[in-house]
Amino acid sequence: MDPQQRLLMMYVWKAIEDAGYSAKRIAGTKTGIFTGTLGSGYQTLINKAGLPVEGYTMTGIVPSVGPNRMSYFLDIHGPSEPVETACSSSLVAIHRAVKAIETGDCDMAVAGGVNTIVTPEGHIGFQKAGMLSEDGRCKTFSDQADGYVRGEGAGMIVLKKLSEAEHDRDHIYGLIRGTAENHGGRSASLTAPNPQAQTDVLKSAYQKAGIHPSTITYIEAHGTRH
């Protein structure tokens, strides 16, 4: 089994426990799972090791099986989807979870992401494409920015409507006021950000949240080279 699937299972379980729920309590409910994921390179390791293809090989590496496996294990009936939009995968997964709750496709959702790097091929390719920082440091807002730094990790959160969370006396870590999603279309290159498109998506999120940008006191940004 791809280590990403194992980590996904562990952290979905941890998130549910942290939210004060048990597997028995959510079984049969419209709980969804939305997980950002990228290819880990595990298939390459299997090929290099010369391991035979078994009946469980594909279910152990296909991205869709990660969230589906947990939905099966927990017997939950909301949407169960992997999301792969490169660096934004986890945020888009949360955005999809929010929308699914708003439309009634699910009553509660576990959303987040997982990323592992188990082979060097992806790193080599990104380096040759000039995407990675030479000194291993992200300098996003500096004119010395020369690339980003890859990382591994996993994180999941449990989402519900605020009114229902308050009614159920859940412990609440935070409130998502608004989310938005778009694409840069044709920019400087296939992988280059589009500043105007990024401005537009931020404006959309602020409008949906009903807040003015001047009231923002903390921003966690993505560390690209541009």
Image (cartoon, rainbow, N blue to C red):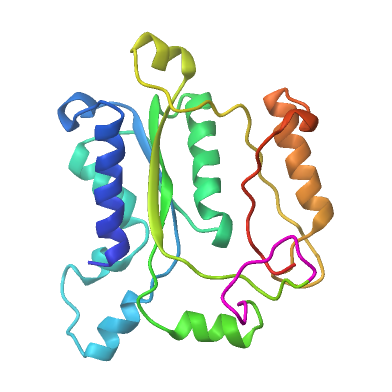
Q: Residue at x 34, y 13 (%)?
A: 169
Q: Residue at x 51, y 86 (%)?
A: 124
- In this view, the residue in front, 57 or 114, is 114
Q: Please give the name of the residue rendered at 68% of the width and 26% of the height, measured from the top-left corner.
A: 209
- Is 29 on the left-hand or right-hand side of 103? left
The answer to whether residue 46 is visible is yes
Q: Is residue 89 magenta?
A: no
Task: Please provide percent x and percent y for residue 125.
Answer: 55, 85
- 78 to the left or right of 174: left
Task: Reply above or below: 213 against 219.
Answer: above
Which quadrant of the structure image shows residue 12? top left
Residue 105, percent across and down?
A: 44, 29
Let me know if residue 135 is in the magenta part. yes
Specify the quadrant of the image occupied by residue 31.
top left
The residue under the point 74% across, 60% down is 141
Q: Which region is colored magenta?
A: 132-143
- Residue 8 x, y percent position in the rendering: 31, 53
Residue 95 in which image quadrant: top right
* Residue 80 in view: no
| Side of 198 relative to 147 (left or right) | right
Magenta region, main secondary structure: loop
Q: Which part of the image, by quadrant, shows the N terminus?
A: bottom left
Q: Position of residue 88 (x, y in %)?
A: 57, 55
